[in-house]
Amino acid sequence: MTRDEAAAAAAADGRDESPQERADRLWSEMLQEVRVSQTGAQILFGFLVSVAFTPRFAALPDFDRNLYVVTVLLGAIATGSLIAPVAFHRFLAGHDMKPELIRVAGRLISVGLLTLALTIAAALLLLLRTATGNPALAWGLSAFVLLWFTVTWLVLPQVVLRRTASRRGDWAPGERADAERGGTNPRRTT
């Protein structure tokens, strides 16, 4: 993107900021977002690790032990993915690569949120199987929670994005079709 294109894009979104200022703002926003999910993932992962050292763990059926292993692995991936942008930033700091950092960090955060949702659903399944003794109920409730995450974390933001963009009439040629396939309007930021 040329300097003129960047200035035009900044003016189009109502902000008067240079590409570097925009990258700094987006990075700060990403750090705020990841702090919330990262803390939750770390606490959940720490709790999951401690479960294996409880007396009742040895009495779990094979399915529940395997579910526990999968849950811990998902928790480790979620935690690692949500911490990775910080490590990535350490390696790229001072190399004038913040736009690349933002793209990669955004993907890592997405992976972290997806695996965090799966970790929570799997942990809930394990907990409910043990607490209720009713596997069907445990599966149903865990599936409902995962569906709830899907709706509130993925579907609802897309609905809001489409409605806002449609109402504003700010779709460029081809962007409406891209958004309808699950993409986003690249000229809009939060």
Image (tube, rainbow, N blue to C red):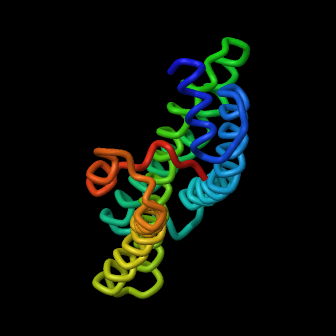
Question: Foreground residue, 146 or 44?
Answer: 146
Q: Position of residue 112 (x, y in %)?
A: 50, 47
Tell me the residue at 53%/44% (across/down): 109
Q: Is residue 184 left or right of residue 88?
A: left
In the image, is 154 to the left or to the right of 103?
Answer: left
Residue 108 vertical position relative to residue 35 in the rendered view, above or below: above
Q: Residue furthest top?
A: 95
Q: Give coordinates of residue 96: x percent, y percent.
A: 66, 15
Residue 175 or residue 24, whichever sits in front: 175
Number of numbered callouts drawn = 0
Q: Is residue 127 above or below residue 66?
A: below
Image location (x, y in percent) of residue 97: 61, 18
Q: What's the residue at 63%, 39% (across, down)? A: 11
| Vertical relation: 74 (above or below) 3 | below
Residue at position x 70%, y 28% in the image:
18
Location of residue 36 by image quarter: bottom right
Residue drawn at (38%, 82%) of the image: 141
Say which of 27 and 36 sits in front: 27
Q: Position of residue 116 (x, y in %)?
A: 50, 56
Q: In the image shown, does 98 or 138 lie closer to the viewer?
A: 98
Q: Seen in the image, is 14 located left or right of residue 173?
A: right
